[in-house]
Image (cartoon, rainbow, N blue to C red):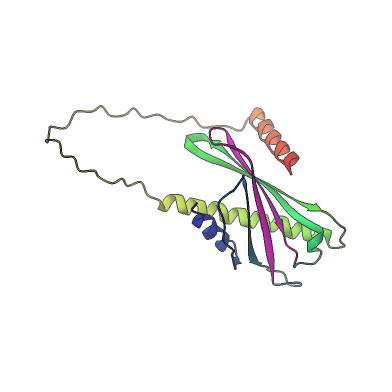
Amino acid sequence: KDTSYIKRITENQNNFDLSEIPGFSNNKREFTYTKRLNNSIGPKQTKCLITETIEHMDINNYIMVKQVTKTPDVPSGNSFAVHSCIYMSWGPGNSTLLTVVSKVVWSGKSFLKGAIEKGSIDGQKGSVSILIKELKDIISSAGTTKKKIKSKKSKKAPKATEPAPVVESPEEEATEETQESESSLVSSIMDKL
C-alpha cells in the first residue's frame, strides 16, 4: 500500500527519522518517528511510538481511527500516552468532515501532569492544523485531467447535448439540532478513548 502521503504529512509536522509506515494489517499498524520539541527546558526531541487501529470502516457512513502515541524519552514519558480518535465522515458538497478528539491517558503519577497535558494537547492541535493544510495541498495538486483515448471508429458529427442543470446547494445553518448532534458525536468519540 502507498503510504507516501502519510509520510509527507508526518515529516511536515516537524518530525524526522521516520520508520517505514506500513499499510494496515488486521486494521492495525505501528510506526515510529522523532519529533522536535520547542520547549525552553527539557528535551529538544523525543521518539514517538505510534499505534493506529481502524475502529470503524464504512466509507458510506464514517471512518474512525484510534491513534495511541507514546513518548518514553520525555519526563514521565512511561506514565502516559496520548489517545486520539480521528473521525471522518461525509460533509456537504462531497466534502469530508474531520473531527479529532485527543486526551492524555495516565498509567502512573507525575508532578508534571498539568504541563504534560497542556503540551500534548497543544502539540496535537498543531499537528492537526498541519494535517489539514497538507491534505488540502495534496488534493488541490492532484489535478482533474483525464487521458484522451484515441478511438478507431469513423469520425461522426458530435451529438448535441443539453447543458447540465445548475444545482445550488442550500447554505447550512447551525441549528440547535446540529449543535446537539455535534456534541453527541464528540461524546461518543470520547467514550472510545
What residue is drawn where x is 68% and y is 66%?
A: 47
What residue is drawn where x is 78% and y is 63%?
A: 77
For this view, does 124 lie left or right of residue 91? right
What residue is drawn where x is 47% and y is 35%?
A: 93
Q: Quadrant of the C terminus?
A: top right
81 inside magenta stretch: no
Q: Between residues 130 and 148, which one lies in front from this camera angle? A: 148
Residue 112: percent from the left, percent from the top?
Answer: 84, 63
User: Up-down: is 159 above or below 121?
Assistant: above
Residue 161 is drawn in which quadrant? top left
Residue 162: percent from the left, percent from the top?
Answer: 25, 27
49 inside magenta stretch: yes
Q: Between residues 88 and 163, which one lies in front from this camera angle? A: 88
For this view, does 86 lie left or right of residue 149? right
User: Up-down: is 140 above or below 75?
Assistant: above
Residue 80 is drawn in which quadrant? bottom right
User: Up-down: is 84 above or below 156?
Assistant: below
The secondary structure making up most of the magenta span is: strand
Residue 156: percent from the left, percent from the top?
Answer: 12, 32
Disc tally is 0
Q: Between residues 57 and 24, which one lies in front from this camera angle? A: 24
Residue 126: percent from the left, percent from the top?
Answer: 63, 57
What residue is drawn where x is 28% and y is 29%?
A: 163
Q: Which residues are magenta?
A: 45-72
